[in-house]
Amino acid sequence: MTIDASGSSPELVQLLTPEGERVEHPDYDIDLTPEEIRSLYRDLVLVRRIDLEAVALQRQGELGIWASLLGQEAAQIGSGRALTDADMAFPTYREHGVAWCRDVDPVKLLGLFRGVNHGGWDPKEHNFHLYTIVIGSQTLHAVGYAMGIQRDDASAATIVYFGDGATSQGDVNESFIWASVFNAPIVFFCQNNQWAISEPLEKQTRIPLYRRASGFGFPGVRVDGNDVFACLAVTRKALEAARTGQGPTLIEAFTYRMGAHTTTDDPTRYRVASELEAWKLKDPIERVKAYLFKNQQADQAFFDSVDAEADQLGADLRRRCLAMPDPEPLDIFDHVYREPHALIDRERAQFAAYLEGFEK
């Protein structure tokens, strides 16, 4: 990828540099008030605090596993805040920032990873689908939903999230075909965090991921995934195009996974420390903070208040996580099917008999 003197790629949409300088782009402009920028900063800080608390809870044995979003906050908050109430989002298992934007209680995310529920929120209530563990399968679900929107003649769009590794999955490529052929109102949002667990980007593609869209017949754009302004502007434009009958768009948010793939992973085994240090200089939160300081749109008291709110949120999240009751063992058989099912009934009875074998 060619890099110019400013340190960015000419094919990368960027509106806020890592140093906090505002830049213009001919195709993507955005006019944000100081209050809106402070709100975006607050989102970024609080979502990172949720993530850090969840990692700590997992390390202490309170969660079975956790997929951290560290470093990807701007991609998720920027795209999440571009959604209207009518739009529908389909996440993977890392979209904690988008969940925050859709008003999903963070403790419900923890319940899934603590093993006390199967998702914990109503997708219809939040227009935010349940987390998807199977890599790439949510893209087909999202296209089907978008085709339903199209047939209902509704003024809405669908957005679906996936990572760079998922682009190698057949489901993702099939969803591109269906979306293109049927001109579905959908935005494909790929968070390219450079690593598919331990496989680097060059093992996934020979060209920039956003350029794959042209082969399927719809536009693609690469955005600085650590720039919340650019992610908001690019996603807004793509969603509006979808809502107005212009079909799908592929957005490649070029970012970096600062932490492990999940808490079961050790990234020091496959990537070098210098790479991590280079990306720390592009931190999505620090660049917004720098912008607010330089333009005198926030003072130290504001930043201190956000930090204090983040600490309170973290403490409250921990308290409510530890207070979540464990489900009854036989509850696992509930809601597998809508109607009674003979096989499930037999398995429930067998497991109940097994449990009876233990001393009370």
Image (cartoon, rainbow, N blue to C red):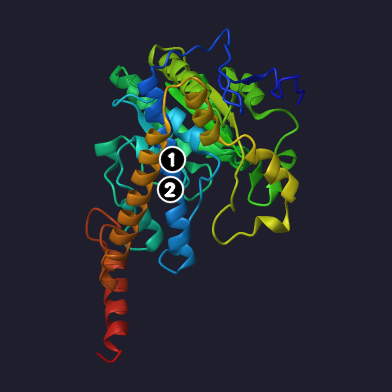
Secondary structure at badge 1 equals: helix
x and y, in percent, of residue 247 in the image: 47, 17
Distance Cα–Cα, label 1 vs label 2: 6 Å
- Residue drawn at 76 percent across, 26 percent down: 1
Whether 163 is drawn above or below 19: the answer is below
x and y, in percent, of residue 19 in the image: 61, 27
The residue pinned by badge 1 equals 45
The residue pinned by badge 2 equals 49
- Residue drawn at 24 percent across, 38 percent down: 125
Q: Observer-nearest residue: 283 or 216?
A: 283
Whether 231 is drawn above or below 269: the answer is above
- Residue drawn at 33 percent across, 49 percent down: 313
Q: Are marks 1 and 2 in contact (CB under 8 Å)?
A: yes
Q: Amino acid at mark 2?
A: Arg
| Position of residue 281 in the picture relative to residue 15 (left or right) | right
Q: Observer-nearest residue: 36 or 217?
A: 36
Secondary structure at badge 2 equals: helix
Farthest-out residue, front: 300
Using the rendered view, name the quadrant where residue 126 is placed: top left
